[in-house]
Image: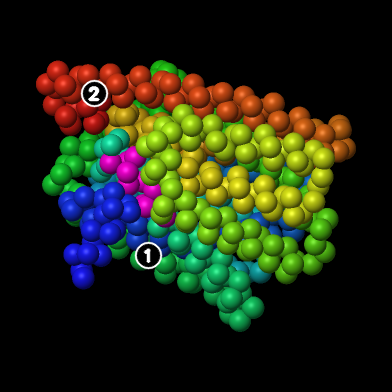
Amino acid sequence: MKFLTMDLLKSVFNVSDGEWKRVLYSFLFFFFLMSSYFILRPVRDEMGIQAGVENMQWLFTGTFVAMLVVVPVFAYLLRKIKRTVLIPGIYIFFSLNILLFYASFQWLNLSVISGIFFIWLSVFNLFVISIFWSFSSDIFSTEQAKRLYGPIAAGGSTGAILGPMVTSVLVEKIGIDNLLMISSGLLLLATIFINKLIRECRSDNERNLTYQMDKDIWSGIKMMIQSPLLRHVGVFILLYTTISTFLYFEQAHIVSEAFSSSSDRTAYFALRDLLVNSFTLVFQFFLTEKIIRKWGVAFCLMLVPLVAVVGFLGLAFSQSVYLLLVFQVAYRSLSFSVQKPAREILFTSVSVGERYKSKNFMDTAWYRGGDAMSGWLFAGLVSVISSLQMVALITVPIALGWMLSGKKIGKIFSQKIIKFYEVDRAGTDKNAVKVA
């Protein structure tokens, strides 16, 4: 019976015998990480509305400034501390941060802490997830990533379903403050499994895991500018943040008009997250790997921009909260289940330095810089046009440009992989192909 079950799982998820432990530990690591985050996400979104939808661009700007501080500090630590020590230490550090917020909410009761928490959680979200995928690119090859990133990402989606459920069930019984304690504990559990993953992969990936970073803490920006692939990925991420920020601001306006009470808005956000993460989980378990392998990276990068074109056309005609919900569920579930794994596959073809420094810069400061810029752009358009529907219509050509950017990246990546395989067939060390 046990062997029959294993054979069935292998046929569904396309995992070989030697890969099971890595996939399982990665799944559980991502599961506890996302459970921790999604317990707090609905609270953050409500805090953003309470601060005033007309002031949200300031919160996005504060997040960007925080990222500008965090990125060079992280680059410096990468140079001084082994990644096998630094990465678990970062998750422990953030877990302690959550406990500090718990104490602040308990004893200080200052409204400014809500804004600080919004900014901190926005930094935490991108930073720890970027590190997770960078580490995954260390231990999986491009071929493995195409097969395994779907089920691994499903661990995060499973945790992202558990998080909102915990929040919706327990927030009335134990209060927001005690939810932070649960979130901190789940993040510590994630740390246990990244340590297991490090021990499991150390012998096979010693070269990647012990690679010494260069001394220039700003080299990640230089790498992004110099590499054709990374330059286009940077443009793609900037367009992605623009579209996502416009959708977030449209959501804030529509939801604040549709629901008058804080509890109703929080319930809407919890329902949104539950639907998004449920659909994402189904895709990641059963469809992501098949879509990537059959249709390719370019198709996966173009799919979500196409959804954005259709969705914003819909919002240009109707500002219905139900249309918004359908748009958000389709946009975010496909972003997490198809676009995100495809985008992470790109980084299996770059060097370790590019993977940690340029990728981390793009996923954090670059990403949040795009958020801040887009937030002010949205606020400016609304003040001039005074119509959310017209702003939605203006967003459509931006989404079309985003789609063309994804097509270009897919072409560059395919050429890069073909070149790697030609070098490999010529007799070059396979590890050099992996970390070239």
- Above or below: residue 6 compared with residue 207: below
Taking depth in this image into account, of 127 and 154 the one nearest to the observer is 154
Check the image and tell me how it is coloured. rainbow
Q: Position of residue 37 (x, y in %)?
A: 50, 59
**In the image, 209: left or right of 285?**
left
> Element at badge 1?
helix
Question: Label 2 neighbourhood size at 10 Å, few (<14), some (14-19), many (20+)?
Answer: few
Amino acid type at circle 1 is Leu
Residue 403: name its quadrant.
top right
Q: Residue 333: in sight, yes or no?
A: yes
Give the magenta range: 144-154
Q: Position of residue 396 (x, y in %)?
A: 71, 30
Residue 179: name its quadrant.
bottom right
Residue 343: name its quadrant.
top left
Q: Which residue is mark 2?
A: 421
Which quadrant holds the N terminus?
bottom left
- Above or below: residue 135 compared with residue 361: below
**In the image, 113: left or right of 220?**
right
Q: Position of residue 434 (x, y in %)?
A: 24, 31
Q: Which residue is mark 1?
A: 188
